[in-house]
Amino acid sequence: MNEEKMLKVEKIRRGTVIDHIPVGRAFKVLKILRISTDPGVTVSVAIHVKSKKMGLKDVVKIEDRILDSSELNKIALIAEGGTITIVEDYSVIKKFVVKLPDIITGILKCSNARCVSNMESAIKPSFTLLSKNPLSIKCHYCEREMETDEIMDSIL
Amino acid sequence: MWLNRDIVSIGDFSVEEIMEVLDRANKMLPYASSGHPKKPLADKIVATLFYEPSTRTRLSFESAAMRLGARVLSLGSLEASSVAKGETLSDTIRIINSYSDAIVLRHPSEGAARLASEYADVPVINAGDGAGQHPTQTLLDMFTIWKELGQINGKSIGFVGDLKYGRTVHSLSKALSLFDVSLYFISPEELKIPKHIRRDIEKRIPVKETKNLDEVIESLDVLYVTRIQKERFPDIEEYKKVAGIYVIRPSLLSRGRKNLIVMHPLPRVDEIPAEIDNLPQAKYFKQASNGIPVRMAILDMILGSE
């Protein structure tokens, strides 16, 4: 069965499908969406799925949950280029590719403990995107450059 | 373009802007010890807000402001102020903003000056934010190289000592990499320049890393020495061994180029013995005094006398 068919077979009634996740990152997606603490949500995870575009990829399907923009931005941090499909009543109502904005605000904190953004509650941490692949961002305040692992650990 | 501009990070400057500051600092040089005869900032107030002690930097800014005729408001002891009562930096800045025409800020948190610049209507000058930026230090270092060697392009600059934690080295090497220079990083394994900084610099200019100062001394136009701090080493014997290797001796300098200069952000400890002070290569005291014309230039440019 090819991937297209498999995904069709396992259609969900309502929810979100996150496709084209870089292989090995599906569990990170679950972690940042805090899926494990929400027993009301049914989740299917497919890892090491063959993909024409990516070689191998991961796929996550979340039933009865539509992701908000802050969650989508978080996903963009770890799965730039991933495809999001929003499903209602078994039909696709929206499909788009997640993209990292040039300025990333409000979804992660600076990994530098001495950064002023970790000291003053009034300010929103903000980061400039330096490069998508490999992922690299720079804190607007302390200018610390962060790469994938540090970014993962800093997602709010 | 300069009027009311915040001076937060050397990374905000282009090559042209750096050269503009150096050029203006050069024009300020004659007035750096006697004061500007026109007192161009006579109607201005400069506030110095220092959340951690750095007497020399504070005095250097205050002297520069006074040399231009400005008046200076200095934050008294922290214990007596609202800061001690737990006021946030953003609140303090909003208040001080109405008292002065520019704020010079020193703060232990990295990024504090950027934050302050967002809350102040008046320009903010970063006088050091923790291990972060200290742009006027970088500019005075560049001014010293430019002034002593006639130009920055074409020069080879060697940094020796603690290249891992030394923020002056990080900022200066990044700023120099905008020019046509070669950089040498000379340090023990434990104190190497951070990889992300080296990677960034290498995109633009050639970089050589070595443990051996002897090996590269003949290639250098500038030897920029930094202090190796004891607290970076868990073992005191290890510290002594490492620190001892990088002590600058006259015999070493005698092997260098004719116009070699030795710089140091000061304070120094043992890495440059007093016997070096009277050699023609020693420029570190001159470098420190260059803080005045450079800070005068910055204040004059952002407070807009022209």
Image: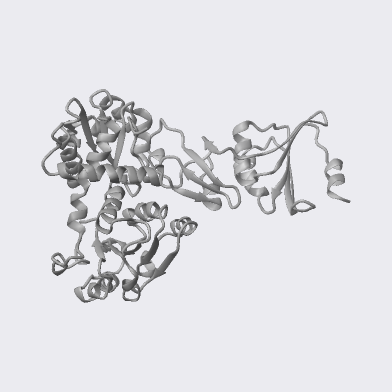
**Residue B202 location in percent, x, y?**
47, 59
Q: Residue at x 28, y 45 (%)?
A: B23
The quadrant in which the C terminus of chain B is found is top left
Q: Nearer the viewer, residue A117 or B7?
A: B7
Q: With respect to residue B134, does B91 lie above or below?
A: above
- Is residue B52 visible to the viewer in this orientation of the structure? no
Q: Residue furthest left?
A: B34
Quarter of the image for the N terminus of chain B: give it: top left
Q: Residue A113: x and y, percent?
A: 40, 46
User: Residue A139 versus residue B302: which sits nearer the camera?
Assistant: B302
**Left or right: residue A6 compared with residue B24:** right
Q: What is the number of callouts on the image? A: 0
Q: Residue at x 30, y 37 (%)?
A: B125
Q: Which residue occupies the extreme top position in the image? A: B98
Answer whether residue B69 is visible to the viewer in this image.
yes
Residue B67 x %, y %: 15, 37
Q: Is B86 above or below relative to B236?
A: above
Q: Is residue A154 left or right of residue B238?
A: right
Q: Is residue B99 left or right of residue A107?
A: left
- The colour scheme is one colour
Image quadrant in which you'd find residue A71: top right
Image position, residue A22 (x, y; %):
68, 51
